[in-house]
Amino acid sequence: MSGDVNKSSAVRCAAFASIGAGVIHGTAVGLHADHPGLSRVFLLLTFAQVGWGVAALLLSHRLVSFSGILINGVAVGGWIITRTAGISLIDGLQVVEKPQTADTICAALGLLALVSLAWFIIARDKPVSSLATMNAAYLTVIATAFAMFAVTGHAHSHVTVDDTTVNGGLSVDANGVIVSPNVSSTTVVEEQTGNAQSASVATTTTVKKTKTTVAPSTTVHPHVQTSDQLLAAASGWPRAWDPARGEDFSGINGATAEQKARAIALIANNARDLAQFASVSAAIAAGYMSIGDGSTGFEHMIKYSLLNDGRVLDTTAPESLVYQVTGTTRTLVSAMYMANPGTAINDQTLVNYAGGLMQWHVHTNLCWTSVNGVPKVVGVTDAAGNCPAGSVHQTGGAPMVHVWLAANPCGPFAALEGNGAGVADLPDNQRVDKCNAQH
């Protein structure tokens, strides 16, 4: 008799819980329409959990209990994995998700079904009262309704990110160069002496009469990580870059085939076209000027006429060349490509150029002065945000990205370390141009 009571109580409790979890999974099907594969997974779980629950209420075969453990065990196990490691085989689940109200209730109901079935199988001689079962049924209905209410009118997000971008009118031409519709003409360096400020023109091109400072303000979108960057980081990006081995981005998520091809072409073109600047003398002859930061171990040389030419990632005309300084030897190791001053760091063309493979950054703490009409970096701001006397604080900067010729443990688009890394649109520990992105 006790076994019959246990059957009519414990298994019924499991059936109600499984049906509730299945209904919540059914609600999730539509919320994940942007990931067809994931929607199908939720649809299968809906049929399996609801179908099993109905069968458990009608049938008494022992096999029903074991199949219920399998179905709900898969559902609960999947929830645990997606909250701790992600599932690389299912589009939409590659990135670790934070527990949310609806999915946590769904997992709890699945767990309740497992516990009830385990009780039925292991402790048949210890019946569960019908009152306890009915209370469990009521709680299941309430929990299911609450979970469905929690997602009503809410577009599910797998990660807490803001993919907001701005359209600055940029476009990518057939050569992979980002082209701006507006081109400025004059680069200005501000010199500060006491309470007076003066401006000296560093370089002029004849396109348009618009003045910009060498350190213009730009929009830094605070703490924004695109879903592409999260997917790339979750799949092991960035990884060490070795030019001798090359890079095909195999196994890396967060970038389309087109974005990967564009990034591969950029790396190859960068290596081909920068060969002419292997020596500092060749760079100087081509119009590049040092910004005076060689003491950091890396010296940037900038061609100021290219800062406002409306073209970026043009490997035939890099805005800046980066030389590694070892004693008196300078070795070309990277190019630093800089967008037009005033370009937003979250411009959609910049962000989508290589998807999650590339991270743009800006500099907001540099202090500049002019030496014989040439802009020079003389330091960074102190704790109070002030620059040394005779220099001007750079309050913003054009978005920029490195493309490396030399091997780099943080990938072909890695930023420099320390102050050289600038700031991005998300915290340092989430950037995909730094080695700590996936830690």
Image (cartoon, rainbow, N blue to C red):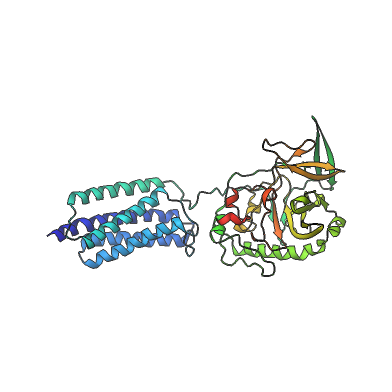
Residue drawn at (37%, 48%) of the image: 148
Q: Residue furthest top?
A: 195
Is residue 334 rendered to the left or right of residue 424?
right
Q: Nearer the viewer, residue 392 or 380?
A: 380
In the image, is residue 373 above or below residue 177?
A: above
Residue at 78% across / 63% down in the picture? 273
Please state, as top left, top right, bottom left or bottom right, where the N terminus lies in the image: bottom left
Q: Nearer the viewer, residue 357 or 212?
A: 357
Q: How many marks?
A: 0
Say above or below: 187 vs 193. below
User: Which part of the image, by quadrant, shows the C terminus?
Assistant: bottom right
Residue lying furthest front: 327
Does residue 55 appear in this view?
Answer: yes
Q: Position of residue 133 (x, y in %)?
A: 21, 51
Camera-nearest residue between 253 and 170? 253
Q: Percent position (x, y) of residue 282?
A: 85, 59
244 is higher (above) or lower (below) than 190: below
Q: In the image, what residue occupies the spot 81% across and 37% down?
A: 191
**Side of 44 where 141 appears, left or right:** left
Q: Position of residue 280 (x, y in %)?
A: 83, 58
x%, y% of residue 143?
32, 47
Q: Confirm whether residue 215 shows in the render.
A: no
Give the residue at x 43% y 59%.
81
Residue at the far bottom in the pictured view: 245
